[in-house]
Image (tube, helix red, strand yellow):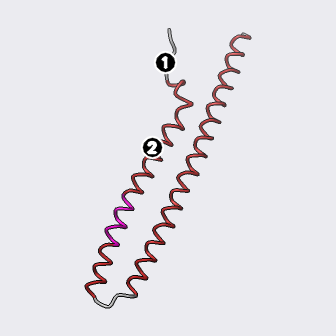
Amino acid sequence: MMKNFEDMQKMGKDSMDATMKSFGTLSKASQQIAAEFADYSKKSFEEGTKVFEKMLGVKSLDKALEIQADYAKTAYEGFVAQATKIGELYADLAKETYKPFEAYTKAPAK
């Protein structure tokens, strides 16, 4: 009976350790993702401001359309790159958060 109690205590401790490791990983990755979103937002705002300033100095419709088209292309490419990066961060988050629990999914040896 005492052996089963000790096994239960060890299992509970191991489970708590895995959970704490997982929460630590989640916290760190969430901060990294938030920083990426903040950096992208700042960069996007700065680029938009530069384009707006260029548009204020334009004297012809053709030049304005050219600036707008260039900005749209650059903004789209930047968005796709950032979305890919964020997607990779979320995938890494899922993998790293699950790692401490991998031992629980393996079938016990008979």
What type is the residue that disc 2 sits on? Answer: Ala
Furthest-bottom residue in view? 59
Is most of the magenta stretch helix, strand or loop?
helix
Residue denoted by label 1? 107
Residue 83 appears at what percent x and percent y? 41, 56
Give 29 or 44, whichever is nearer the viewer: 44
Which circle, 1 or 2, is nearer the viewer? 2
At 58% from the left and 44% from the top, the residue drawn is: 26
Disc 1 versus disc 2: distance between alpha carbons?
A: 25 Å
- Label 1 sits on a secondary structure element that is loop
Determine which of the numbered discs, if any, sits on residue 66 in the image. none
Residue drawn at (33%, 71%), measured in percent from left and top?
72
Residue at (53%, 32%) from the top-left corner?
Answer: 99
Is residue 19 a member of the stretch shown in magenta?
Answer: no
Q: Quadrant of the N terminus?
A: top right
73 magenta-colored:
yes
21 over 106 or under it: above or below: below
Label 1 Cα neighbours within 10 Å, binned few <14 / some 14-19 / many ≥20: few
Q: Nearer the viewer, residue 2 or 36?
A: 36
Residue linked to disc 2 = 91
Q: Position of residue 14 (x, y in %)?
A: 65, 25
From this view, report whether residue 23 is shown above or below residue 13. Answer: below
Q: Which residues are magenta?
A: 71-80
